[in-house]
Image (cartoon, rainbow, N blue to C red):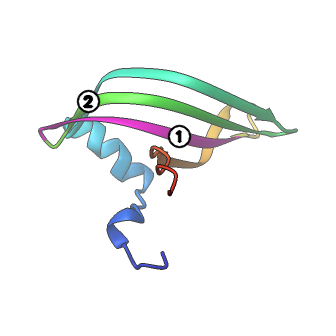
Amino acid sequence: MLASDVASLGAVLSREEDLALHHSGALRFHRIDPSERRILMLEQAAFVGVRVHLWGVFNGSPFQEDLRFSRLWQRTVSGAWQVVAGQATRVQAPAPPSS
Protein backbone atom coordinates (compact mmCIF):
# COMPACT_ATOMS: atom_id res chain seq x y z
CA MET A 1 0.00 0.00 0.00
CA LEU A 2 2.86 2.37 0.77
CA ALA A 3 4.20 1.90 -2.77
CA SER A 4 0.70 2.26 -4.31
CA ASP A 5 1.14 -1.13 -5.97
CA VAL A 6 -2.51 -1.53 -6.93
CA ALA A 7 -1.86 -4.77 -8.82
CA SER A 8 -0.84 -6.38 -5.53
CA LEU A 9 -3.83 -5.11 -3.55
CA GLY A 10 -6.29 -7.58 -5.02
CA ALA A 11 -9.94 -7.31 -5.90
CA VAL A 12 -13.29 -7.48 -4.20
CA LEU A 13 -15.88 -9.76 -5.79
CA SER A 14 -19.53 -9.97 -4.93
CA ARG A 15 -21.12 -13.37 -4.34
CA GLU A 16 -22.78 -13.10 -7.74
CA GLU A 17 -19.47 -12.29 -9.48
CA ASP A 18 -17.73 -15.21 -7.77
CA LEU A 19 -20.48 -17.64 -8.76
CA ALA A 20 -20.55 -16.29 -12.33
CA LEU A 21 -16.83 -17.12 -12.75
CA HIS A 22 -17.55 -20.75 -11.90
CA HIS A 23 -20.82 -20.96 -13.83
CA SER A 24 -19.31 -19.53 -17.03
CA GLY A 25 -16.35 -21.90 -16.94
CA ALA A 26 -13.89 -18.98 -16.81
CA LEU A 27 -12.54 -20.47 -13.55
CA ARG A 28 -12.06 -24.24 -13.31
CA PHE A 29 -10.16 -26.09 -10.61
CA HIS A 30 -8.37 -29.33 -11.54
CA ARG A 31 -6.90 -30.11 -8.14
CA ILE A 32 -7.26 -28.75 -4.60
CA ASP A 33 -4.85 -29.89 -1.88
CA PRO A 34 -5.64 -28.56 1.61
CA SER A 35 -2.67 -28.39 3.98
CA GLU A 36 -3.96 -26.53 7.04
CA ARG A 37 -7.34 -26.00 8.66
CA ARG A 38 -8.41 -23.94 11.65
CA ILE A 39 -11.95 -23.76 13.02
CA LEU A 40 -13.00 -21.42 15.80
CA MET A 41 -16.53 -22.11 17.07
CA LEU A 42 -18.50 -19.26 18.62
CA GLU A 43 -22.08 -19.29 19.95
CA GLN A 44 -23.90 -18.63 16.68
CA ALA A 45 -20.94 -18.32 14.33
CA ALA A 46 -17.78 -20.10 13.25
CA PHE A 47 -14.54 -18.88 11.71
CA VAL A 48 -12.92 -21.30 9.27
CA GLY A 49 -9.42 -20.75 7.88
CA VAL A 50 -7.79 -23.10 5.39
CA ARG A 51 -4.61 -23.14 3.33
CA VAL A 52 -4.82 -24.85 -0.04
CA HIS A 53 -2.70 -25.39 -3.10
CA LEU A 54 -4.86 -25.01 -6.22
CA TRP A 55 -4.33 -26.01 -9.84
CA GLY A 56 -6.71 -24.91 -12.54
CA VAL A 57 -7.50 -22.66 -15.48
CA PHE A 58 -8.58 -19.00 -15.37
CA ASN A 59 -9.77 -17.42 -18.63
CA GLY A 60 -7.94 -20.10 -20.61
CA SER A 61 -4.60 -19.76 -18.77
CA PRO A 62 -3.38 -22.50 -16.44
CA PHE A 63 -2.45 -21.49 -12.90
CA GLN A 64 -1.23 -22.94 -9.66
CA GLU A 65 -1.54 -20.99 -6.42
CA ASP A 66 -0.90 -21.39 -2.71
CA LEU A 67 -3.77 -19.58 -0.96
CA ARG A 68 -5.33 -19.01 2.45
CA PHE A 69 -9.12 -18.79 2.58
CA SER A 70 -11.15 -17.44 5.49
CA ARG A 71 -14.89 -17.82 5.90
CA LEU A 72 -17.19 -16.55 8.62
CA TRP A 73 -20.26 -18.74 8.99
CA GLN A 74 -23.35 -17.70 10.95
CA ARG A 75 -26.24 -19.85 12.11
CA THR A 76 -29.54 -18.55 10.71
CA VAL A 77 -32.84 -18.41 12.58
CA SER A 78 -33.81 -21.71 10.95
CA GLY A 79 -30.58 -23.32 12.24
CA ALA A 80 -28.81 -23.55 8.87
CA TRP A 81 -25.23 -22.31 8.45
CA GLN A 82 -24.59 -19.47 5.98
CA VAL A 83 -21.36 -17.78 4.86
CA VAL A 84 -21.55 -14.08 5.79
CA ALA A 85 -17.97 -13.05 4.92
CA GLY A 86 -15.06 -14.54 3.04
CA GLN A 87 -11.56 -13.67 1.93
CA ALA A 88 -8.65 -15.25 0.02
CA THR A 89 -4.97 -14.30 0.18
CA ARG A 90 -2.05 -15.53 -1.92
CA VAL A 91 0.72 -17.05 0.19
CA GLN A 92 4.08 -15.74 -0.94
CA ALA A 93 7.42 -17.37 -0.29
CA PRO A 94 9.43 -15.52 2.37
CA ALA A 95 12.08 -13.12 1.12
CA PRO A 96 15.64 -14.42 1.34
CA PRO A 97 17.61 -13.09 4.31
CA SER A 98 19.63 -9.97 3.62
CA SER A 99 23.40 -10.24 3.85
- The dot on residue 25 is none
* Percent of width and height locating residue 36: 60, 26
**Residue at (20% x, 40% y) in the render:** 26
Please report the residue visible at 26 percent of the width from the left and 36 percent of the height from the top: 23
Q: Image check: 31 left or right of 46?
A: left
Near-viewer residue (29 or 85)? 29
How crowded pointer 1 is (Cα within 10 Å; few <14, some 14-19, many 20+) is rated as some
Q: How many marks?
A: 2
Specify whether residue 68 is painted magenta. yes
Residue of label 1:
68
State how far apart marks 2 and 1 are (Cα): 16 Å
Percent position of residue 96, x then y = 47, 49
Which mark, by number, is residue 56?
2
Main SS of residues in magenta: strand
Q: Image quadrant of residue 29?
A: top left
Q: Amino acid at mark 2?
A: Gly
Q: Residue 35: give x, y in percent of width and height.
A: 55, 23
Look at 66% across and 35% down and name the residue there.
48
Read off the magenta span.
60-73
Look at the numbered disc 1 and give the secondary structure of its residue: strand
Secondary element at image label 2: strand
Q: Callout 1, which amino acid?
A: Arg
Task: Determine the residue located farthest toward the right in the rendered image.
Answer: 43
Q: From the viewer's perspective, is residue 7 above or below residue 42?
A: below
Front one among 17 and 47: 47
Determine which quarter of the picture holds residue 42.
top right
Quadrant assignment, res 61: top left
Residue 91 colored magenta?
Answer: no
Q: Residues within 10 Å of mark 2 (few under 14, many from 20)?
A: some
What residue is drawn where x is 58% and y is 32%? Answer: 50
Percent from the top left, x then y, of residue 78?
A: 74, 34
